[in-house]
Amino acid sequence: MEKPFLLDFDANQHAVLDPGHKSAKLHYHFPKKLLFAFITTDAIQNFLRQYPHQVVGIFKCFMGETEIYEVELAHEKITFCQALMGASSAVQLLDWTISYGVQQILAVGSAGVLSKIPENYFLVPTKAIRDEGTSFHYAAPANIIDLQSDYLTSVEKLMVENKLKVKEVMTWSTDGFFRETAKKVAQFKKLGASCVEMECAALAACAQFRHADFAQILFTADSLSTTSGHEDRGWGRDAHGQALALAAAIMDQI
């Protein structure tokens, strides 16, 4: 019988094509703190209008260009960009920013709920189920990745200081947006997952592999809490601006 190879993990830090490969001939250097925003373009632009900022890099691919900003907060200059959707795309962008100086990452984005949690409610994932393929290129095979760290603890502390209740959760990171079947929802609820999104497990694995700090703040959007039918609700749109403001306040203090 042929030996399985799809889950083989290679811990070598260098690949044939590294994220900051010399052939790119780029001379970027980003501030070490990155606010990685799975947020609409309108909310991104509204956020930028509130702070002095400049473009300090551009990530290019066939889908277009992602501008990387240096944003001047009250006490800190940070790196800021709109994240790309899906584990593979998001991690490609994240790994690239790390290669140009990023060391601490705070991601913000939405999640569908698997239990009766109100919309626009903030969650902090402490564990993520690895139901995506990207994390297996950055960490040895396992069902779950642990996000607990001193950095995460600091983020939670600052959330409390900003008068927000911290609800720690396990999240389910999936590649299959249209394959969240009733059977899978029930399976991951039984494992303890409170919400579902598409990137957290992979982002955490990439950050840990590159020895960078990582935490994510999720806000609740749609609902899969009953398998009888999906509820769009408002897709969490009302939380976009608040999520960015919260993350910026945390990054300015951490």
Image (cartoon, rainbow, N blue to C red):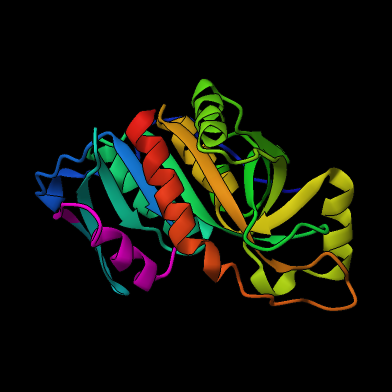
Q: Which residues are magenta?
A: 39-57
Up/down of 233 relative to 87, above or below:
below
Up/down of 37 relative to 28, above or below:
below
Q: Is residue 91 left or right of residue 4?
A: left
Q: Quadrant of residue 90?
A: bottom left
In the image, 54 versus 214, the foreground residue is: 54
Q: Is residue 97 left or right of residue 54?
A: right
Residue 70 place in picture, x, y as percent: 19, 47
Residue 245 place in picture, x, y as percent: 41, 51
> Which residue is the extreme one toward the front?
163
The residue sitting at 85% across, 44% down in the picture is 191
49 falls in the magenta region: yes
Residue 31 place in picture, x, y as percent: 22, 37
Q: Quadrant of residue 98?
A: top left
Residue 116 place in picture, x, y as percent: 82, 59
136 falls in the magenta region: no
Which quadrant is the C terminus positioned in? top left
